[in-house]
Image (tube, rainbow, N blue to C red):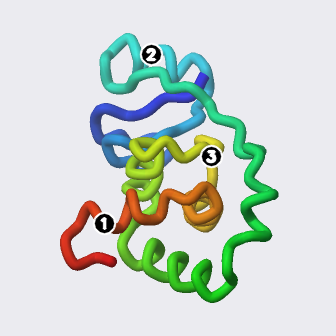
Amino acid sequence: MTIELLKKLRHDKKEHVAGAVLNLPEEVEKRLVELRAAKKVKTVDASVEVDEQASSVDPEYYKECYEDLDEAYGRDDLARAARDAKVEFKSNAKKDEIIDAVIKQGKVDDLLTDDEGQE
């Protein structure tokens, strides 16, 4: 099971913000869901068929989008915004993997045009 935190959490001496998507031991996840501190979320396979799109992304455009997204978002906020934009990626994906998925799935504008003057 994968969970999304509804509240701030400290687990294994590590702070997690509300909205973070985590894979914890099953008993911990169940307890957090029962306490309404987290909710279950679907796990999405990162092997989405985007490889065909990857070759069609201009390298210069990719670099520019990557830098803009990296500067505009922290990992957890990026993951949240990407999920809202229906970008498919693994729940435990690293920030660079999420950015890669956003660009390859053509969702950059969805994430960068929400904030005025961000583009």
**Quadrant location of the N terminus in the rendered image:** top right
SS under mark 3:
loop
Residue tagged 1: 113
- Residue 32 position, x and y percent, is 41, 21
Looking at the image, which is closer to me, 59 or 20? Answer: 59
What is the C-alpha distance between the residues marked 1 and 2?
A: 38 Å
Amino acid carrying mark 2 in the image = Arg
Looking at the image, which is closer to me, 16 or 116? Answer: 116
Amino acid carrying mark 1 in the image = Thr
Looking at the image, which is closer to me, 73 or 114? Answer: 114
Crowd band around label 3 with a 10 angstrom C-alpha radius: few (<14), some (14–19), many (20+): many
Check if mark 1's residue and mark 2's residue have beta carbons within 8 Å. no
- Residue 48 position, x and y percent, is 73, 44
State which mark lies toward you, 1 or 2: 1
Looking at the image, which residue sits at the far bottom? 60
Q: Is residue 32 above or below residue 70?
A: above
Residue tagged 3: 89
Crowd band around label 1 with a 10 angstrom C-alpha radius: few (<14), some (14–19), many (20+): few
